[in-house]
Amino acid sequence: MSLLIKNGNIITATDNYIGDIYIEDGIIKEIGINLNKDSYKTIDAKGKIVIPGGIDVHTHLNLDVGIAVANDDFYTGTIAAACGGTTTIVDHMGFGPKGCNLKHQVDVYHEYAKEKAVIDYSFHGVIQHINDDILNEMESIVNNEGIPSFKVYLTYDYKLEDEEVLKVLKRLKELGGITTVHCENHGSIKFLKDYYINNNLKSPKYHPLSRPVEVEGEAVNRMINLAKIVDDAPLYIVHLSSEIGLNYIKTAHEKGENVYAETCPQYLVLDDSKYEIENNEGLKYIMSPPLRKQRDIDALWKGINDGHIKTIATDHCPFAFNKDKQLGKDDFTKCPNGAPGIEERIPLIFSEGVMKNRISINKFVEVCCTNPAKIFGMYPKKGTIQVGSDGDITIIDPNIEKILKAEELHSNVDYTPYEGIKVKGYPIYTILRGEIIAKDNNFIGKKGYGEFIKRKSKI
């Protein structure tokens, strides 16, 4: 099978030019002008934006949080991703049984994804506890399973203490891997949640008050210092939401420290006024960290432009508003945390970022495609448009204006946090390894076409 994309405005993290792309056997074989090939299919992309397929390195499919299970599995979730211009995800595996080894969840997630995923995928390992067996097992997960990134939590049921975090950081540095961290101060959250509940302050608007920016800032700063203690081990801060957290990262960068930061569309587009919407609509926005103030939003956009924030992912974690989220209707602490967004990321960041002149179109590709591939061991196979790379392409029509509505999206959930937001520019083709898998907001790919990506260590 072969595909020829002609006359497109080809955008990478560094380049912008008009040209043609020839894909054969899933690989980009030639890039040029006025290419003529006997192709299975030709797409005329004149006037359109041609970018590498989007890469979302923070999703939660099939996630079981005990009180609820994420509404998207690896079939429905990856269909939504494909329709939104994303061709690869790296999913954060959920916790397994208490005391399980690392391979346990790897095997569970391979079963979840096998013959279901419609786009390419990988997993981040998850650390629930630390002992010598776990530290030794990391080597086989990194080298044999192709999973060189692991997540640790500083809060929730399987939170790690500082000594344990140090051991993870040190071991992954030795293995050429990277530690990703959910940065919130557990003790502060417990103190504040207990205060609000004991005073019968239980509506959604108390969720952000129970997790203020200082909760994130303290944990970000602590993790930066811990990573420095173990020879500047590579550190990746997930879902950064606050100016204070960003400032600690800036300081680390000024010192030349090995820290990467990710933010998400919700922290760039939405603010904490959403928690005060009537009829408990604020439950839709209960996620951790919570939505912040406009000041934080402005700081994060600047952080992207300045290079302190390297990636934009989604933290896609969909729970039904009319079912799962209602567990929190009388007590916000009972609401499962998370929101959908896997489909909305590319159009939102293109519209809010590029079309509103907050970021350049090259920066858009850098943070949504190229940096995720580089940091997590998939580049140049993924994340760029060059000869030899996978034929993963997203074509955006910059003239399409669309109002985001849950009823027109593909996630298996009953709402979008971005309902009613008008976007300009929308993916019209999503191409994975030379195969058109989505066209004009319709999925036309095949169940199970997605392949597991064994990622490389040593970023």
Image (cartoon, rainbow, N blue to C red):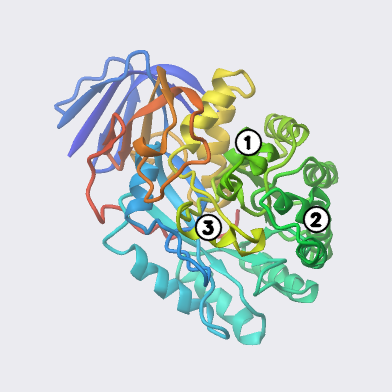
Q: Quadrant of residue 121?
A: bottom left
- Please determine whether, in this image, residue 296 is positioned above or below residue 174: above
Local SS, label 1: loop
Residue 247 can be seen in this image: yes
Q: Foreground: 93 or 228? A: 93
Q: CA distance from mark 1 to mark 3?
A: 21 Å
Is residue 272 depicted above or below 326 in this figure?
above
First in sequence: mark 1 vs mark 3: 1
Give the SS element for disc 2: helix
Q: Amino acid at mark 2?
A: Val
Mark 1 and mark 3 residues within 8 Å of each other at the beta carbon: no
The kind of residue on which mark 3 rests is Gln
Choose the circle earlier in sequence order: 2 or 1: 2
Which residue bears the numbered disc 2? 215
- What residue is pinned by disc 3? 326
Kindly report which numbered mark, 1 or 3, lies closer to the viewer in this rendering: 3
Is residue 456 visible to us here?
Answer: no
Query: Dot 2 surroundings within 10 Å: few (below 14), some, or many (20 or more)?
Result: many
Sequence-first disc among 2 and 3: 2
Q: Which of the two marks, 2 or 1, is nearer to us in this view?
A: 1
Point 75% across, 64% down: residue: 197
Query: To which residue does mark 1 refer?
Result: 270
Identify which residue is drawn at 47% across, 74% down.
105
**Residue 125 in which image quadrant:** bottom right
Q: Position of residue 32 (x, y in %)?
A: 34, 21
Q: CA distance from mark 2 to mark 3?
A: 26 Å
Q: Quadrant of residue 7?
A: top left
